[in-house]
Image: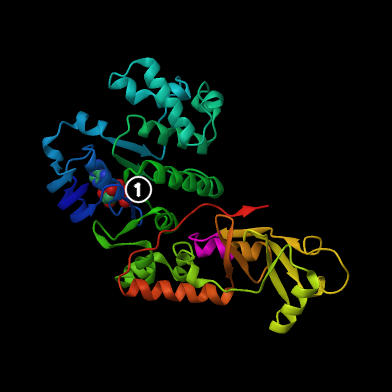
């Protein structure tokens, strides 16, 4: 979809910002460009919509050499989001969002309808926020409007230059999550610039790690963290790259342990006897349909009458299969638990323990060493009852 062929950019003062760059971004792929300040990320990005012209080399978008495409026409097909959003201060949020459709000649009602849809898509209720002016929004909200505006004309390509750089870390994570959810729905071809390796790893299907004007490694986040191509990349991704891997490695059914299970409608004494025979001290409780209900300790099952329902505990937290290991680890810490239940929908699949978590991490390192693609990570957040 986007292809760089030996692209070099030398500024008039002699600075070589980008040097013989060749890489390709597939349709629907989200590629993050990451590297220290001044390494040529913004220059790379601005050559795609011809705000900057390369000194040599070619850039193809959808098979077409963009040097032959009228820049105005080109930019209609390419959404552009920058850090200082640049919203028009005297226009409402709705009109700001509708800017591009209006520019390309959509009728006003249609443009506004589309703008409302997009505000909704980026998590801003159009009724509440549409009539406001930019100064009446928080930094994070302004950034969302920037994203909505860039998507308004439904361009196949989206360029984002440090889009979440100007907001605080908590809002930033929220925006990243929302952006991933949105991207899963709209599947644009995205080039996203960041200087933050965490963000690059979290968002990118692939990441390009920049050295000075060149790409040092272009691969999946798992591979970059697991097998850095050079000492430079290793030091850039940091000594805690093992920890970072937690956020790009998905929980798989094979990672799970199968603890003893009792059914809600089972007779407590019988369940207790079964656990004793197995040498188990607790069990996961499932309802009659096999859905996760909670857990119960052996002591709580022994003696007295009543049902399991009245003795056990409702499960407070669980994680969906496919979620990143980091999420499971976070839930264990948050609930001070030695295990966390993993579900597929509401169906109980097994539990993840610290030992299994470690095994899963090893598995993913080995897989990447053999060149297996990054697992599909599902970022849906944990559910709390
Ligand atoms: P990044 O976005 O990775 O921080 P840039 O692409 O903005 O890096 O810049 C790459 C290099 O090119 C830097 O050394 C920067 O100082 C230089 N540069 C950027 N724009 C210009 C310009 N208009 N004229 C001269 N040098 C520039
Ligand atoms: Mg920059």
Q: x, y (%) of residue 151?
A: 36, 34
Q: Residues within 10 Å of mark 1 (few under 14, many from 20)?
A: many
Query: Which residue is pictured at 52% across the width and 52% down the height?
Result: 380
Residue 12 visible: no
Magenta span: 320-329
Q: Quadrant of residue 214?
A: bottom left
Membership of 327 in magenta stretch: yes
In the picture shown, does residue 64 fall above or below 256? above
Q: Which residue is mark 1?
A: 192
Closest to the observer: 317 or 310? 310
In the picture shown, does residue 369 fall above or below 4? below
Q: Would residue 141 appear left or right of 209 to someone viewing this image?
A: right
Q: x, y (%) of residue 85?
A: 41, 34
Residue 118 visible: yes
Closest to the observer: 273 or 7? 273
Identify the image's colour scheme: rainbow, by chain, secondary structure or one colour.
rainbow
């Amino acid at each position: 979809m986007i292809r760089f062929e030996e692209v070099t950019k030398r500024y008039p003062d002699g600075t070589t910002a980008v040097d013989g760059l060749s890489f390709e971004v597939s349709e629907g792929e989200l590629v993050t460009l990451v590297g220290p300040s001044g390494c040529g990320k913004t220059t790379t990005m601005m050559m795609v919509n011809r705000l900057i012209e390369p000194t040599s080399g070619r850039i193809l978008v959808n098979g077409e050499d963009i040097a032959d495409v009228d820049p105005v026409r080109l930019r209609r097909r390419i959404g552009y989001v920058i850090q200082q959003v640049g919203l028009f201060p005297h226009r409402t949020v709705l009109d700001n969002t509708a800017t591009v459709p209006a520019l390309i000649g959509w009728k006003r009602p249609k443009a506004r309808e589309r703008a409302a849809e997009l505000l909704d898509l980026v998590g801003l209720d159009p009724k509440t926020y549409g009539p406001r002016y930019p100064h009446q929004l928080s930094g994070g909200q302004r950034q969302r409007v920037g994203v909505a505006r860039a998507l308004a004309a439904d361009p196949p390509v989206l360029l984002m230059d440090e889009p979440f750089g100007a907001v605080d870390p908590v809002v930033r994570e929220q925006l990243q999550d929302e952006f991933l959810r949105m991207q899963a729905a709209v599947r644009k071809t995205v080039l996203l610039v960041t200087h933050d390796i965490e963000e690059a790893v979290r968002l990118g299907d692939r990441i390009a790690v920049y050295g000075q004007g060149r790409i040092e490694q272009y691969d999946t986040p798992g591979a970059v963290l697991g097998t850095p191509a050079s000492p430079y990349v290793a030091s850039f991704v940091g000594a805690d790259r093992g920890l970072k891997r937690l956020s790009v490695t998905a929980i798989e059914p094979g990672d799970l342990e199968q603890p003893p299970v009792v059914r809600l409608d089972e007779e407590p004494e019988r369940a207790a006897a079964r656990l004793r025979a197995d040498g188990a001290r607790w069990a996961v409780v499932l309802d009659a349909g096999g859905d996760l209900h909670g857990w119960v300790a052996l002591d709580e099952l022994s003696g007295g009458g009543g049902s399991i329902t009245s003795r056990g505990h409702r499960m407070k937290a669980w994680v969906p299969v496919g979620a990143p290991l980091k999420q499971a680890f976070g839930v264990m810490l948050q609930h001070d638990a030695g295990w966390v239940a993993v579900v597929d929908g509401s169906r109980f699949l097994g539990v993840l323990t610290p030992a299994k978590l470690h095994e899963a991490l090893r598995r993913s390192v080995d897989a990447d060493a053999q060149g297996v693609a990054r697992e599909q990570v599902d970022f849906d957040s944990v559910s709390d009852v």
